[in-house]
Amino acid sequence: MSDTDEITVYSDYVCPFCYLGRKSLAAYHSDREERLDIDWRPFDLRAGKRGPDGEIDQNADDGKDEAYFEEAKKNVERLKQEYGADEMSLDLSRDVDSLDAQVASYYVKQEHPEQWLDFDVALLEALWEDARDIGDVDVLADVAEDVGLDPKEIRSAVADEAWHERLEAQFDEAREAGVTGVPTFAYDGYAARGAVPPAQLRRLVEGAE
């Protein structure tokens, strides 16, 4: 039996299935007697479409054509209904770059770990429920302030190249760990990929326990 009470979640804020996967995780957690903490690990979905100037190039070939996105929309709609995520207002977000949001989140996770989960959830809700551009540092500062963080700290972290380098190292670690898509849930040497249902998360965690 494992003595860990932490599940690792590789995700990117601009991934709709990451939002839905967290809804599934919350549903599983609400039925679980013991606390299960989240160890978030960042993953960069936009790496193949981000140009040298930092802008998203929609013409860059990342292997995902319109047929892929149409199928993704159908799957998002299905999972919205399955997980009762009626508050989700976007089905896909192809133009938003989460890089700065991930820098901010990683900074908070390291410097203010007791406030990280509130900030993390608020970022997901800002994009997927309120359709706010979390690639905008003003939005990040507002979200931070809403959960009791100093918005000036967030602006400073986003502008600090050292925090960007630390985040890039996290992206490298995810690739080295064999993570090729998100969300990926990992627990005690086992993993599940995708916005899997609560029952599968239960099997992942409690089967390992």
Image (tube, rainbow, N blue to C red):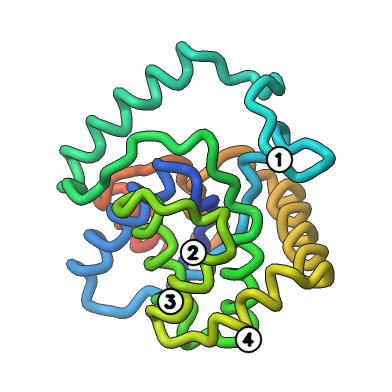
Cα distance, mark 2 to mark 1?
18 Å
Residue 66 can be seen, yes or no: yes
Drawn side of residue 144 relative to residue 79, left or right: right
Label 1 belongs to which residue? 55
Q: From the viewer's perspective, is residue 15 above or below residue 6? A: above
User: How crowded is the residue under tag 1: few (<14 C-alpha within 10 Å), some, or many (20+)?
Assistant: few
Give the class, few, some or many, for how many residues have Cα within 10 Å of label 2's Cα (few <14, many ≥20): some
Q: Identify the residue position indicated by label 3 in the image.
A: 5
Q: How many marks?
A: 4
Say what amino acid the circle numbered 4 marks.
Answer: Glu
Q: Which amino acid, by three-letter code, is at mark 2?
A: Val
Spatial separation of the CA atoms under disc 3 and disc 4: 21 Å
Classify 139 as above or below 132: below
**Element type at marker 4?**
helix
Q: Which residue is mark 4?
A: 111
Residue 203 seen in the figure? no
- Dot 1: what SS? loop
Of circles 3 and 4, the one toward us is: 4
Please name the residue that numbered disc 2 is placed on. Answer: 139
> What amino acid does circle 3 point to?
Asp
Residue type, mark 1 in image? Glu
Mark toward the start of the polypeptide (3 vs 4):
3
Identify the residue at the far top of this view.
67
How far is the residue under mark 2 from the one under mark 4?
A: 20 Å
Whether the residues at callouts 3 and 1 have beta carbons within 8 Å, the answer is no
Asked whether disc 3 touches disc 2, contact meaning CB atoms under 8 Å apart, the reply is no
